[in-house]
Image (cartoon, rainbow, N blue to C red):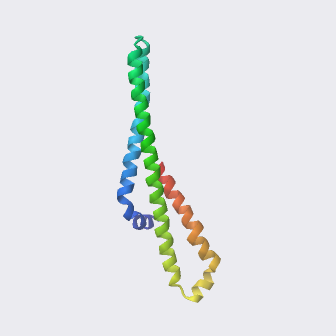
Amino acid sequence: MISLLRTYLAPYRRPIALVLVLLLAQALTNLYLPELFADIINNGVTKGDPDYIIRIGALMLAVTGILGITSIIGVYFSARIAMGFGRDLRAAIFRSVESFSQVEVNRFGPASLITRNTNDVQQIQQHELLDLLD
């Protein structure tokens, strides 16, 4: 399974690296928001400084916007990687099945070959998509 992933995910190394960077950015922004909220409470609310609350609140909105943008871009590239991976894997399976003799096709059965080329690849594709998003 690892060699399969290594072979068919190799063309997507840069997008995978981009997705990992975006996931890191999402994690950092998610961790930064509670810090900003605590800062508003500690320095804005307790001192009664509405300008500080508005300024840090605007910063929180900006950080949330960055989080949303990185999430959308990450999902987009994750989906492109997973769909391209599935396409490449289906094409490889199809090429392999085309080289089968009639005896081999009859032994596996057309229904089984179609299932492997559609449902099984789709399961792997969905697994990859979820792995990239987590």
Residue 124 locus on image (x, y percent): 53, 62
Residue at 48% across, 73% down: 91
Residue 107 locus on image (x, y percent): 62, 83
Residue 2 locus on image (x, y percent): 44, 64
Q: Is residue 30 visible?
A: no
**Which picture quadrant has residue 43?**
top left
**Which of the two residues, 69 or 83, is positioned nearer the viewer here?**
69
What is the total number of numbered labels drawn onto the structure image? 0
Q: Is residue 112 visible?
A: yes
**Which of the two residues, 86 or 53, is positioned nearer the viewer here?**
53
Residue at 39% across, 28% down: 59
- In the displayed structure, 15 sits above or below 36; it is below
Residue at 58% across, 88% down: 102
**Which picture quadrant has residue 28?**
top left
Residue at 61% across, 71% down: 115
- In the displayed structure, 51 sits above or below 18; it is above
- In the displayed structure, 94 sits above or below 72; it is below
